[in-house]
Amino acid sequence: MKTYAEYLRMVEEALAPSLCGLGEIPERLRQAMLYSLEAGGKRLRPVLLLAACDFFGGDIREALPFACGLEMIHTYSLIHDDLPAMDDDDLRRGRPSSHKAFGEATAILAGDGLLSAAFELMLNAACRMDSLRGAKAARAIAGRCGVTGMVAGQTVDVTEEGTEPTAEKVRYIHLHKTADLLCAPMEAGALLACARPADMEAAVTYGLELGLAFQMTDDLLDVEGSEASLGKRTGQDAAAGKLTWVSVRGVEGTRADAAESLRRAKTAITGTGRDASFFTELADTLLERKN
């Protein structure tokens, strides 16, 4: 397997060409889409997809359009998440959010454009394959980011603001709003590699548990982090009446639950019998992250 930095480099080099290669895009729309897509970040989701495909013996060159497509979906979700009707956040990765830089209408269209471009890119790649593995990977991503996945979690997150927090509601939000989009790359990468059923199950478990821990850590950072390191305002969750793990379990309980989710993630992926050090080391970095 490659290092995180090597997978990251592949994604960074392919993102803008993948989008612009789809055809002529109106200039203002193209600028807005690239403004958010090229804003940087860890690229955790596309890196995970490439690593999962590699881990299970697939061809990462075939997986690259799916990795780029998934990052486009993640970027669209951030653009829409920052809108005044959603989280109303003026900053994203240390600079003005899309709607502040381009206006609300263009920001909405940029998000819409990235979502549709993602599936055009992935399905173009799937049509070039000699089996249904590409179509299955795109379907898995669609399910994880759609109305029973990320969009479902976002809906409950928005509509339940200000209500009494319960572990059941918070888990539902975390599982779908965040964990589904970290499970998607593991599931899609494994499908592209034609992984065995037992390995598929391990990949899904790893992704979901990693995603739960990721969101728990996000909740902690909103309480304990700094705006400078996060590149966005802190204290937003409490001010908006958001249902977070901290609101149910407190800081120490959230930290303990995140550690337990990471333990389950590592147990699942090491159970495949392969050298899973890439994934276990990645999990270990989550609890210490500052952004």
Image (cartoon, rainbow, N blue to C red):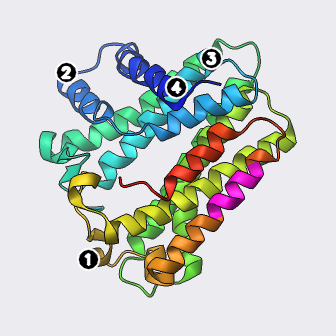
The three-letter code of the residue at mark 2 reads Glu
Left or right position of 269 against 10 = right
Amino acid type, residue under disc 3 in the picture: Glu
Q: What stretch is highlighted in magenta?
A: 261-268
Q: Position of residue 253 (x, y in %)?
A: 53, 79
Q: Quadrant of residue 117?
A: top left
Residue 7 is tagged as 4
Badge 4 marks a residue whose secondary structure is helix
Q: Position of residue 288 (x, y in %)?
A: 45, 57
| Residue sitting nearer the eye, 154 or 175 | 175
Considering the image in quadrants, where does the N terminus appear? top right
Residue on which the image places disc 2: 27
Viewer-nearest residue: 230 or 277: 277
Q: How far apart are marks 4 and 1 (CA)?
A: 37 Å
Label at residue 239: 1
Q: Is residue 29 above or below residue 235?
A: above
